[in-house]
Image (tube, coloured by chain):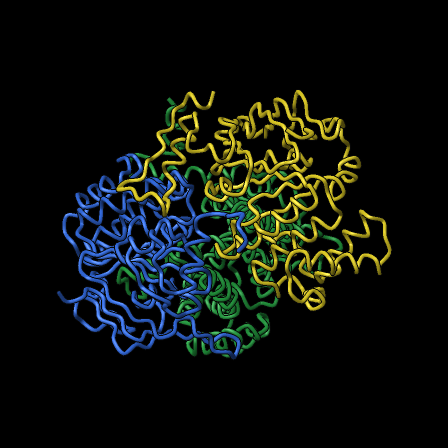
Chain colours: A yellow, B green, C blue
């Protein structure tokens, strides 16, 4: 495929506990080109931790190790906090699930987005404001001037998520990691937000990692999909090939998801095979 | 043998009601013992109880009441380890017996204040509306009374003594518990598991006492333990003013008071009971702090 | 056949901060005995509020609200409570944190002075697919799916003819959701239940329900059968939009 800017080989994330060690991510390997990569898994599968590891956001005392973890030829494993700060926002960015928890409640929307712009683009206040308004328009907010002056608690769910996307994209990152960006949204709003992401990815050639527990959304939005279970990547395939997946967990997950198109008397349940954890 | 007992208690899959309850008690006990603050506090409080119960034996046969004017104001010696007071009574015996007065006051106050506070608070929090408003205004009225002044008023009206001291302290203490119980109740009254009980047809008293009360208890216990220090000091204060236990019953506050006049030359008469008050207050404070860390780490 | 649940012109108004919010606006529908009726809608549609009004948990006005032929008002008697039970959305909030599964299941039996408590508790635990060893666990020792099973057992232990389910699987993983939905399908047969299932997930509702009401902003937009829903044969624009959105993202222009 197109240039593989992100190369991950044998990524491991462990969290030491009082009596044992939790292995959140085990030997995960994948690459990312100019495409949309979906990571699907249930709770505890390690998908969110993987996303955070790529941005150096795994909280202490978590330990991240990998045989290879490179972005644009740069070895991420050796990054200091300063290195990460230079990368984040400008080259790599992350949109998280609930805008309520990611936006600063005491600053206006305009202030927050403008601050991100000034920080990463090293521009003045007037230019930052211009870019902010342009970005708010790009995420289909109808009255950018008005929203510019609002505080986060005055935004509806869908608008809050769009503001988050605007804030994460204003520095024009090359890689965006979206962790459950639409899970807290109504399904009609969800599609609008996905459309925005779709446009932005196509127009700017942005690379996207889309993390979600929702197989339907990921299968319809992404190009390629990774399925995670118990910290491991158990399957990797093209999104449109999910129906013909090989790993029993993926097949079971597809069969367990109720769908409007295929009525079933009983939904398949996932019989967990302990060999999947090896 | 103890290993299997430990496993039985710590099991995440209890197989009987007894195992579940004992397991929970054991886990709570372990949490207390593991917390150094709570443990030290607990040791002191237990020591207080033991001293009060075993005072006759710990005093080595000395009576707290026997006066011996010939050896009055004697310094600590082999015969009287803590010395003697202005009437020649053994201070060690009086200190140990004095624990009984302290313990009585603490216990009586707790037994009066906690039930009243819980009932008022839970009812106010659960029923809301005008019931809440009325109960909270009553609570506010009692909160406004200064403890010592009320005690003086009671002593003037009804005469001094431990019972009146207990009443005075209780009247001014219960509002805090009502507030705590109300605030805990408000937090859970609208939650799904309470709504589920309503949907099952549980009566309001049943919901309050079976479902809400267990969740209020930990906050109330923490508050009570922390309050104990203050209550002991207030009781000592009342004793100091002559309003608590009446002579010749030994009581630490009264002992400090009577030792005031000779504090410069015969320091032990006032200081020993003073140290007792200090240690016991500290013990309750530490225990309360530790319990709060265990039960409600967010507010610490 | 007379409807098991009959609702006509149901409205619920909340007063908050000096303003009146109409959460439910003149909603009417009927549920036949043995039927599983679905109510689907997005946030703010009022679907959960409708359920709570039927259960008597919130104040409401209606020209008719009848449960099993009897009018049901805001105040319910203890006997009324045996008619209908409720399963809540959040498995982490619907069980008392200091009560074991055994305590939780005994409670309704104790309240209604039912005999043979032990046997009934054991049967209820088995019916919802829990192991006997789960009986004396506390909620924090159970997974989300297990807690939801306990919530269902609690709802069914008094054998109510009507079961109301408020987003019972929204907080669960897909694989756990499948187990719980299968369980509900099995139990509605063995317990001969009439139920109303509320969800924001069209696929879940279409899977379990024979007839489905679509709500938007407090109003009932339309009622259709599961087949009509799957075929996309909706009359209202909003329903069509909802069906299209539920199919996932489409690159075609909106």
Seen from the viewer's position, the closer of residues A134 and B236 is A134
Determine the image quadrant of residue C12. Answer: bottom left
Q: Is residue B70 visible?
A: no
Rendered view: A273 above or below B118: above
At a point 17% along the width and 60% down the height, the residue shown is: C33
Q: Nearer the viewer, residue B148 or C150?
A: C150
Q: Residue furthest front?
A: C252
Measured along the vertical axis of the image, is residue A137 above or below residue C139?
A: below
Residue shown at 29% from the left, 67% from the top: C54
How many tags in the picture?
A: 0
- Quadrant including the N terminus of chain C: bottom left
Q: Within the image, what quadrant is residue C75 found in?
A: bottom left
Q: Position of residue C245 (x, y in %)?
A: 46, 53
Res. C60 visible in picture: yes
Which residue is depicted at the point 44% across and 68% down? C217
Residues A191 and B269: in front is A191
């Amino acid at each position: 495929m197109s240039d593989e800017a992100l190369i991950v080989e044998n990524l491991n994330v462990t969290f030491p506990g009082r009596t044992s060690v939790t292995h959140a991510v085990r030997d995960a390997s994948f690459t990312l080109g100019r495409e949309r990569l979906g990571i699907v898994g249930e709770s505890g599968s390690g998908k969110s931790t993987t996303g955070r590891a790529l941005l150096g956001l795994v909280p202490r005392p978590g330990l991240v190790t990998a045989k290879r973890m490179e972005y644009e030829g740069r070895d991420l494993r050796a990054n200091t906090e300063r290195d990460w700060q230079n990368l984040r926002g400008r080259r790599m960015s992350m949109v998280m699930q609930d805008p309520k928890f990611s936006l600063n409640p005491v600053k206006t929307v305009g202030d927050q987005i403008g601050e991100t712009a000034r920080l990463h683009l090293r521009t003045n206040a007037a230019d930052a404001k211009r870019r902010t308004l342009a970005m708010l328009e790009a995420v289909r907010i109808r009255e950018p001037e008005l929203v510019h002056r609002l505080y986060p608690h005055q935004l509806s769910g869908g608008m809050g998520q769009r503001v988050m996307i605007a804030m994460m994209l204003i520095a024009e990152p090359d890689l965006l990691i979206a962790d459950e960006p639409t899970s807290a949204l109504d399904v009609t709003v969800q599609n609008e937000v996905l459309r925005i992401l779709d446009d932005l990815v196509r127009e700017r050639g942005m690379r996207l990692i889309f993390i979600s527990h929702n197989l339907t959304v990921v299968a319809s939005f992404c190009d390629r999909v990774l399925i995670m279970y118990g910290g491991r990547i158990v399957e990797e395939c093209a999104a449109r090939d999910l129906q013909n997946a090989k790993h029993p967990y993926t097949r079971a997950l597809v069969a367990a998801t109720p769908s409007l198109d295929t009525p079933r008397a009983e939904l398949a349940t996932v019989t967990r095979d302990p060999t999947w954890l090896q | 043998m103890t290993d299997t007992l430990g496993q039985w208690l710590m099991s995440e899959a209890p197989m009987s009601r007894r195992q579940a309850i004992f397991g929970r008690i054991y886990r709570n006990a372990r949490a207390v013992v593991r917390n150094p603050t709570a443990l030290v506090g607990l040791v002191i409080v237990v020591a207080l109880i033991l001293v009060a119960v075993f005072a006759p034996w710990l005093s080595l046969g000395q009576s707290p009441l026997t006066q011996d004017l010939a050896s009055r104001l004697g310094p600590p010696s082999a015969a009287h380890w803590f010395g003697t007071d202005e009437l020649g009574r053994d201070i060690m015996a009086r200190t140990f017996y004095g624990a009984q007065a302290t313990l009585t006051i603490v216990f009586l106050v707790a037994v009066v204040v906690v039930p009243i506070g819980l009932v008022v608070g839970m009812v106010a929090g659960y029923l809301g509306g005008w019931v809440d408003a009325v109960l909270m205004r009553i609570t506010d009225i009692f909160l406004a009374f200064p403890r010592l002044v009320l005690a003086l008023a009671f002593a003037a009206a009804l005469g001094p003594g431990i019972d009146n001291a207990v009443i005075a302290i209780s009247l001014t203490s219960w509002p805090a518990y009502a507030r705590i119980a109300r605030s805990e109740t408000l937090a859970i009254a609208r939650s799904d598991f309470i709504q589920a009980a309503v949907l099952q047809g549980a009566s309001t008293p049943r919901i309050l006492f079976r479902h809400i009360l267990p969740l209020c208890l930990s906050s109330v216990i923490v508050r009570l333990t922390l309050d104990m220090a203050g209550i002991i000091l207030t009781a000592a204060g009342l004793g100091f003013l002559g309003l608590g236990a009446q002579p010749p019953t030994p009581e630490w506050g009264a002992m400090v008071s009577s030792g005031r006049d000779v504090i410069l030359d015969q320091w032990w008469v006032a200081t020993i009971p003073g140290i007792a008050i200090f240690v016991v207050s500290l013990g309750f404070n530490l225990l309360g702090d530790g319990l709060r860390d265990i039960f409600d780490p967010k507010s610490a | 056949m007379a409807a098991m649940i009959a609702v006509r012109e149901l409205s619920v108004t909340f007063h908050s901060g000096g303003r009146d919010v109409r959460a439910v606006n003149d909603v009417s529908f009927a549920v036949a005995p043995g039927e599983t009726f679905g109510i689907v809608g997005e946030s703010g549609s009022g679907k959960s509020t409708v359920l709570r009004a039927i259960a008597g948990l919130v104040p409401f006005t209606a020209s008719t609200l009848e449960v099993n032929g009897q009018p049901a008002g805001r105040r319910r008697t203890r006997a009324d409570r045996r008619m209908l039970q409720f399963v809540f959305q959040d498995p982490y909030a619907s069980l008392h944190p200091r009560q074991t599964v055994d305590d939780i299941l005994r409670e309704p039996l104790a309240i209604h002075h039912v005999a043979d408590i032990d046997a009934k508790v054991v049967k209820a635990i088995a019916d919802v697919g829990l192991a006997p060893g789960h009986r004396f666990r506390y909620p924090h020792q159970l997974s989300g799916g297990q807690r939801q099973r306990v919530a269902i057992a609690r709802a069914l232990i008094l054998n109510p003819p009507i079961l109301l389910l408020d987003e019972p699987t929204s907080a669960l993983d897909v694989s756990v959701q499948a187990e719980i939905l299968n369980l509900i399908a099995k139990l509605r047969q063995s317990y001969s239940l009439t139920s109303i299932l509320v969800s924001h997930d069209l696929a879940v509702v279409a899977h379990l329900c024979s007839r489905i009401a679509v709500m938007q902003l407090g109003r009932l937009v339309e009622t259709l059968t599961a087949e009509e829903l799957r075929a996309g044969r909706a009359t209202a624009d909003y329903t069509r939009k909802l069906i299209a959105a539920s199919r996932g993202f489409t690159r075609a222009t909106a």
